[in-house]
Amino acid sequence: MNKDKIFKLAKGFRGRAKNCIRIARERVEKALQYSYRDRRNKKRDMRSLWIERINAGSRLHGVNYGNFMHGLMKENIQLNRKVLSELSMHEPYSFKALVDTSRNAFPGNKKAVLPPKKEGLSIVV
């Protein structure tokens, strides 16, 4: 890369990394490596976030994530994880219908183990 392009990419860097060509070249190359790596990591992080949200939503109805997804697969419901996580957050009644469908499709889901109720919590002063 020529000098002008390096300095253009190094705009906003701290210290001599923005105006000394040798240091700027090293910092720009490293920044491009980080951006390449993190474009892939972003996809991985988003998928794990969607799975966490689906798991939290399905456990509210007594089914864990693996059994929920297996039941959906058996029923041939082809919703991706992004859509399922949005449903679990913003459309709880629609998500409950999907959980019920999944529970009926997969025998492992029949035993609904609901989380324990927290009763009698009082503050002693």
Image (tube, rainbow, N blue to C red):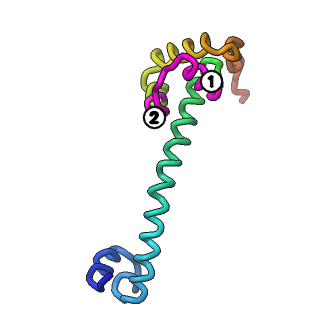
Q: Position of residue 117 (x, y in %)?
A: 69, 18
According to the picture, the residue beneath numbered tag 2 turns out to be 82
Q: Callout 2: 10 Å neighbours few (<14), some, many (20+)?
A: some
**Magenta-colored stretch includes residue 88:** no
Query: Horizontally, is 38 left or right of 60 in the view?
Result: left
Q: Residue visible at 71% across and 18% down? A: 120
Specify few, some or many for label 1: CA neighbours under 10 Å numbering under 14, 14-19, or 20 or more.
some
User: What's the distance in space between the residues labelled 2 and 1, CA to CA?
Assistant: 17 Å
- Taken as a whole, is the magenta stretch helix, strand or loop? helix
Q: Which residue is mark 1?
A: 59
Secondary element type, mark 1: helix
Point out the image quarter for the C terminus: top right
Residue at (51% x, 17% y) in the render: 98
Q: Nearer the viewer, residue 93 or 122?
A: 93
Q: Amino acid at mark 2?
A: Lys
* Image position of 125 with respect to 31: above or below: above
The image shows residue 47, relative to residue 16, as above or below, that is: above
Start-end of magenta stretch: 65-84
In which image quadrant can residue 57 be found? top right
